[in-house]
Amino acid sequence: MIRVGVNGYGTIGKRVADAVAAQPDMELVGVTKTGPNYGAEAAVRRGYDLYAAIADRAEEFEVAGLDTAGTLADLLDVVDVVVDCCPSGVGARNRPTYEAHGVPAIYQGGEDASVADASFNARGSYEAARGADSLRVVSCNTTGLSRLLAPLDEAYGVEKARVTLVRRGGDPSETDRGPINDVVPDPMTVPSHHGPDVNTILPDVDVDTAALKAPVTAMHTHSVNVTLEDAPSTAAVRELLAGESRVFLIPERAGIDGAGALKDYAADVGRPRGDLWENCVWEESISVQGRDVYLFQNVHQEADVVPENVDAIRALATETPREESVALTNESLGVGLDSLLSDGGTSRTPVTADD
Ligand code: NAD
């Protein structure tokens, strides 16, 4: 059993903790919180051992009536791997602590790539992560792009990818983020940092990205154009992506027209927290014109990196091959949506412009 600790129990940390607890070859030893808020209560209710992230504040848990099993240092003494899910930049500050305890660490995409020995995405760089003492699971957007570009590059060669990312303004629980009533370029400079981040996973793929932020909380939307070296048919690209276990092709007849319906669908099929671990690609948006592929995909920022963290733990701590780890993660979590309404993407509804 790989003994795992999760340091930082927020949006990503609580999901990673649940995913680790669901693995047959992993034991979730415990999670940390900085203070006794509703997140700490949720961890206790799930039966997870709670550790005080900041030793000086350990007493606060006791005063609030929440038992702790110790401090972060105690947790680090008894785990094989720590998954850092702290806010961006805090992971880098935690690194000396993990190193002092000799515990291999997995960081998240809000950290600079230099925080770890290698950046990680199970589809794009699992084997390259071998031998690393630390890994950084790339961001939600980079994860979504890597999962898409890796198979396209392998099958047809990517000459140039151009992606516009319409990013969610904040997560549903983040009341202090925005914009509240605008769509703003962010960053204003083009290309954005996302393309170079994809290159930490797929160094040979030429990709430019431009990003905006929109007043939505559910998901990111990517408008993708990839110029390929070959000229496959639209049907062939649809089939290729349908074969990817972490890509969900949304069937046209499902009537899913955006993030709201997607999250509704996820809840209806019983997904915990309505999570979508897969890239969600609108099947009828996949279109090949000459050597250019076009498509729209949505990425659930709170969820798509979760199975990647599980695979990163195995890549770091075991000799498990990629296919085996991905299959085990998928099976134990239930990754891989397969709609009963899939029809191979043959039907098309013509659309008339009205603005
Ligand atoms: P979050 O704010 O929801 O959660 C972070 C948690 O860490 C909070 O509970 C916070 O109280 C806690 N924390 C703060 N300082 C701490 C410390 N010193 N020790 C232990 N815990 C501490 O943040 P998040 O959205 O889960 O993001 C975590 C990381 O994951 C970031 O690097 C982020 O960029 C990355 N990420 C976030 C998303 C997303 O959309 N939310 C997607 C992919 C990757």
Image: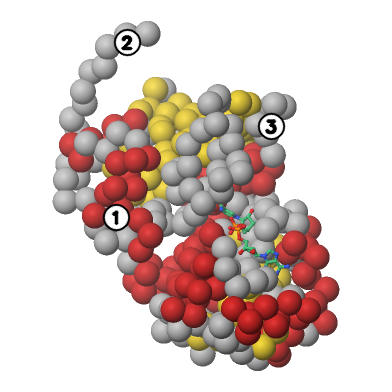
- Where is mark 2, residue-wise? 353
**Amino acid bearing label 1:** Ala
- Where is mark 1, residue-wise? 267
The answer to whether mark 2 is within 8 Å of ligand 1 is no
Colour scheme of the rendered structure: secondary structure
Query: What whole-number distance in Å separates the C-alpha atoms at marks 1 and 3?
Result: 32 Å
**Amino acid bearing label 2:** Ala
Packing grade of label 3 (10 A; few <14, some 14-19, many >=20) is few
Q: Residue at x 34, y 36 (%)?
A: 258
Q: Earlier in the sequence, mark 1 or mark 2?
A: 1
Q: Residue 334, position in %: x, y?
A: 33, 66
Q: Earlier in the sequence, mark 1 or mark 3?
A: 3
Residue 119 visible, this orientation: no
Image region (quadrant) for ligand 1: bottom right
In the figure, 168 relative to 84: above or below? Answer: above
- Where is mark 3, residue-wise? 187
Residue 1 visible, this orientation: yes
**Amino acid bearing label 3:** Pro
Q: Residue 319, position in %: x, y?
A: 56, 81
